Image (cartoon, rainbow, N blue to C red):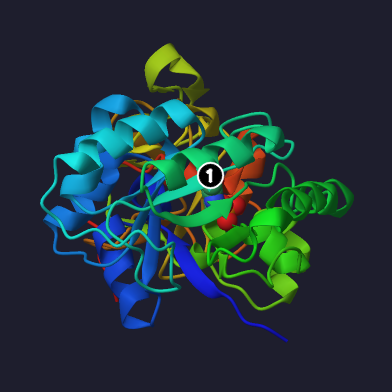
C-alpha cells in the first residue's frame, strides 16, 4: 500500500479556526504543505512566519503572479495564457531556476499546479487542454509541481467521484513519467478511500473534526470537532410577564423570566435563523437554554432556567455532534452545512487554543 503526503487545507481562516495557529500545529505534526484559496490568505501566513510550500487553490489571475513569486507560492493554473504570464514574470527574477518538475516536499521555484476540471465544472482546464498547457510550461521553463482535480460530491456519491477519478487518471496517464505529483482527494474522498493512493491528499473539514457529509457515520469513526464557542452573559435581568424581547418583538415573556444577553450575533456568524430556535448550554448543569427573540447583529438573548451565578460560562457551540448546539446541529437547524457555520465565525472574538 502506498501512502500519500498531506496538504493541509487552511483556507477561510482554517475554516474559522485561525489559519496561523492551525498551520503551525499542522507543521508541528509533520504536514509540510498547506493550501489556501487566495493569494492574500497565503501572504497572511507568510507574514506570520509560515514557511514551506503553500498552494493557492483558486484560479490564478495575472495581477497576482508577481506576488506568487515574491512569496514563493504554488499557483493554480488552468490555461496557457497564465503559463505565459508566469514565464514572463519568472524571466525578471534573479532566483536560480530549477526547471525539473516537482519533488514531494520541495517544489522548484516558480512551480505551478495545473488543475483539471473532471466534472465539477468550476475552475480547471478541460482534460483535452492538459497536453498544451504542459507543453507551454515546458517550452517556457515553468516547472510543474503537480496536476490535480477537485471532487464535486465525494462524501455522498462514490460512483460519480470514481468517474471523476477515472477521467483524471486517464488524462494524466501520458505524463506520468515526468516526475509531476498528482493529488485529488478532499475529506469525503479520503473517508471513502477514493484517490488516496496518489502523491498527496488535501483534507480540509476533517482536520477540524467536522464531517464532509453524514454525521452518524463520521461520529462512529471516532472524530470529534475541534472548536467550541464559550461566552459569559454581558447582562442578566429578570423580566416580568408580558415583556417583548428583541427586534420585531418576536418573543413575549409568559411569566417572570431570567433573560441573559450574550455579546455575539449574526455579525459573528451566529445565524439569525437561530432566532427563537437555537439553544446554548449552561456549562454548570448541562441544561440547554433557548434563544428567545431575534438574534441581532451583536447580541443574542437567552432564557435562563434561574438566576445565574456571577460570570457563569455558557457554550454557544458545543464541540460534539449535539443536534441543537454543535456546528453540525446548528447547520441542520438553519439549513446549511457545518463548513458554513464555522467559516463564518468572525475574528472579532479571540480564539483560545488549549
Ligand atoms: N481541495 C480543494 C481544491 C478545495 O477547494 C477544498 C475545499 O473546498 C479542499 C480540497 C478541502 O475540501 P474538504 O474541506 O471537503 O476536505
Q: Residues within 10 Å of mark 1 (few under 14, many from 20)?
A: many
Q: As displayed, is residue 312 above or below residue 249?
A: below
Where is residue 345, by image quadrant?
A: top left
Q: Is residue 290 visible?
A: no
> In the image, residue 71 lies at what x, y percent?
19, 51
Q: Is residue 231 above or below residue 271?
A: below
User: Which residue occupies the extreme bottom position in the image?
Assistant: 1
**Which one is nearer the viewer's eye here, 173 or 271?**
173
The residue that disc 1 covers is 134
Which residue is pictured at 73% across the width and 57% down the height? 173
User: Does the residue tagged 1 have its C-beta within 8 Å of any atom of ligand 1?
Assistant: no
x 84%, y 46%: residue: 160
Q: Nearer the viewer, residue 52 or 309?
A: 52
Q: Quadrant of the C terminus?
A: bottom left
Q: Position of residue 125 (x, y in %)?
A: 60, 33
Q: Is residue 287 left or right of residue 48?
A: right
Residue 105 visible from this viewpoint = yes
Asked where in the image residue 35 lies, by quadrant, the reply is bottom left
Q: How many marks?
A: 1
**Residue positioned 45% across, 47% down in the render:** 138
**Left or right: 349, with 149 as reference point:** left
Q: Is residue 222 above or below residue 159?
A: below
- On-image quarter of the N terminus: bottom right
Give the answer, above or below, for where 10 lies relative to 179.
above
Q: Secondary structure at mark 1?
A: helix
Q: Give the residue displayed 61% in from the left and 42% down from the top.
A: 337
Residue at the right extreme of this rendering:
159
- Horizontal and vertical percent position of residue 272: 47, 28
Q: Is residue 260 left or right of residue 130?
A: left
Q: Residue furthest top?
A: 248
Q: Position of residue 248 (x, y in %)?
A: 44, 12
Amino acid at each position: 500500500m502506498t501512502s500519500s503526503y498531506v496538504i493541509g487545507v487552511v483556507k477561510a481562516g482554517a475554516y474559522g479556526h485561525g489559519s496561523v495557529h492551525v498551520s503551525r500545529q499542522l507543521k508541528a505534526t509533520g504536514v509540510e504543505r498547506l493550501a489556501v484559496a487566495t493569494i492574500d490568505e497565503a501572504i497572511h501566513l507568510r507574514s506570520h512566519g509560515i514557511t514551506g510550500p503553500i498552494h493557492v487553490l483558486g484560479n490564478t489571475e495575472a495581477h497576482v503572479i508577481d506576488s506568487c513569486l515574491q512569496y514563493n507560492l504554488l499557483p493554480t493554473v488552468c490555461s496557457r495564457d497564465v503559463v505565459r504570464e508566469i514565464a514572463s514574470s519568472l524571466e525578471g527574477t534573479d532566483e536560480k531556476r530549477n526547471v525539473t518538475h516537482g519533488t514531494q516536499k520541495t517544489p522548484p521555484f516558480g512551480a505551478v499546479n495545473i488543475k483539471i476540471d473532471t466534472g465539477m465544472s468550476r475552475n480547471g482546464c478541460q482534460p483535452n487542454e492538459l497536453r498544451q498547457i504542459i507543453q507551454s510550461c515546458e517550452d517556457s521553463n515553468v516547472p510543474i509541481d503537480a496536476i490535480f482535480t477537485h471532487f464535486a460530491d465525494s462524501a455522498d456519491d462514490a460512483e460519480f467521484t470514481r468517474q471523476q477519478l477515472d477521467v483524471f487518471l486517464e488524462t494524466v496517464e501520458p505524463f506520468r513519467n515526468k516526475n509531476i505529483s498528482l493529488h485529488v482527494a478532499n475529506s469525503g474522498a479520503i473517508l471513502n478511500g477514493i484517490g488516496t493512493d496518489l502523491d498527496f491528499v488535501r483534507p480540509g473539514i476533517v482536520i477540524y473534526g467536522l464531517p464532509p457529509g453524514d454525521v452518524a457515520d463520521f461520529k462512529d469513526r471516532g472524530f470529534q470537532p475541534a472548536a467550541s464557542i464559550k461566552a459569559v452573559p454581558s447582562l442578566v435581568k429578570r423580566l416580568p410577564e408580558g415583556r417583548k424581547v428583541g427586534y420585531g418583538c418576536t418573543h413575549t415573556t409568559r411569566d417572570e423570566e431570567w433573560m441573559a444577553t450574550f455579546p455575539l450575533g449574526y455579525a459573528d456568524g451566529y445565524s439569525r435563523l437561530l432566532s427563537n430556535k437555537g439553544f446554548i448550554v449552561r456549562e454548570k448543569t448541562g441544561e440547554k437554554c433557548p434563544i428567545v427573540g431575534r438574534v441581532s447583529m451583536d447580541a443574542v438573548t437567552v432564557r435562563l432556567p434561574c438566576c445565574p451565578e456571577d460570570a457563569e460560562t455558557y457554550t454557544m457551540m458545543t464541540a460534539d455532534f449535539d443536534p441543537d448546539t454543535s456546528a453540525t446541529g446548528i447547520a441542520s437547524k438553519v439549513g446549511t452545512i457545518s463548513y458554513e457555520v464555522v467559516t463564518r465565525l468572525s475574528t472579532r472574538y479571540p480564539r483560545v487554543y488549549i
